[in-house]
Amino acid sequence: MRHTMLKRLGIGLLGAAAALGTVAAPGASAGTGPSTCPTKQPAPVRIATGAAFGSGQRLTSGDTALAMQPDGNLVQYLVRPDCQNGPVLWSSNTYGNAGAYAVMQSDGNFVIYRANGGPSTGGALWSSGTWGQAGATASFDGGALRVHNGTSVPWQNVSGYSPARDTSNNPLQQVGDRLLPGYPMGNGSWAESSSVWLVQQNDGNLVLYRKSDGTALWTANTWGHPGARTDISSSGTVEVVQNGSRVWSNPMTQPSTPGSYLKVQDDANVVLYRPGTSDAANALWSTGTWGKG
């Protein structure tokens, strides 16, 4: 199991449907990708000033991919072990514009244009809003898409699996297979084991996906609450919260324990444990998905 980190900041994207199964947002092509696995890029993949990201192109960084889809949607995915697209992390919501492409403009704006559009002819569908940053470049790094101007990052979608941040935007160190009290998991973020991803979607739904084929094994059924995040409450329960209001918490058959944590396991189960434990006798709740990975 990899011990990396989580990003807890969110950004809006089209969410997945609630029904269990392979789930994709409109304009997203879950289960599609290259027939052979490209070399994974551990470092940021950069889009230089003036460079275009054409229709049908796909970049990979770590276990994530950025695809400029033929339908015109720019989408970030988790990548399955067979290199096919898994759950959606973020989307520009520009589907329905066949042949659209992205360009990192010399004025610093990262823009998606219609197939027959461009910087001199117009037809912009979406942009990062970063004009006035001459010479800026774009980068894709482990699920996060950013625009850099050399000294700062004027725009980023902050979706991804990378250093967690607290409510004051300070970096945190947290292993990637668990959720600890006080460190909420925001939109487009995930925890994982060798067999499954637990994803906080931007429609508010918390979903457990199998890595091998992208099938949804469990869901909190909290779609329709965009911007919601998942946290461990002060009493030790798992909660999905939107704007300070709880929209879901795990059912408890025994008293909750402050300091409990949620672990995503290699056996495909997600378990709430008492603090400092990881054995069945101290399990307080689970998704009941063991053996389904």
Image (spheres, rainbow, N blue to C red):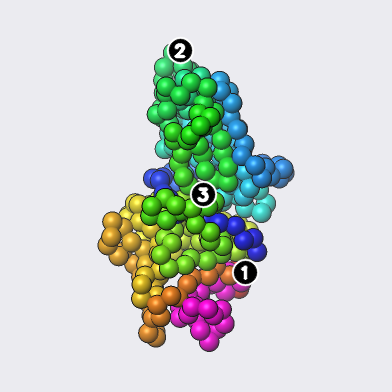
Tell me the kind of residue under disc 1: Asp
Q: Nearer the viewer, residue 202 or 22?
A: 202
Question: In the rendered image, which residue does mark 3 sit on?
Answer: 160
Residue 182: quarter of image:
bottom left
- Per the image, label 1 sits on a secondary structure element best described as loop
Residue 266: assigned label? 1
Disc 1 crowd, CA 10 A, few/some/many (<14, 14-19, 20+):
some
x, y percent for residue 237: 39, 73
Magenta stretch containing residue 285, yes or no?
yes
Label 2 vs 3, first from the N-terminus: 2
x, y percent for residue 141: 58, 42
Q: From this viewpoint, is residue 6 visible?
A: yes
Residue 120: assigned label? 2
Q: Is residue 51 above or below residue 69?
A: above
x, y percent for residue 108: 47, 24
Q: Nearer the viewer, mark 2 or mark 3?
A: 3
Q: Is residue 169 above or below residue 178?
A: above
Residue 196: quarter of image:
bottom right
Image point (53%, 87%), residue name? 281
Image point (35%, 56%), residue name? 228
Tell me the kind of residue under disc 2: Ser
User: Which region is colored magenta?
Assistant: 267-290
Q: Is residue 234 above or below residue 211?
A: below
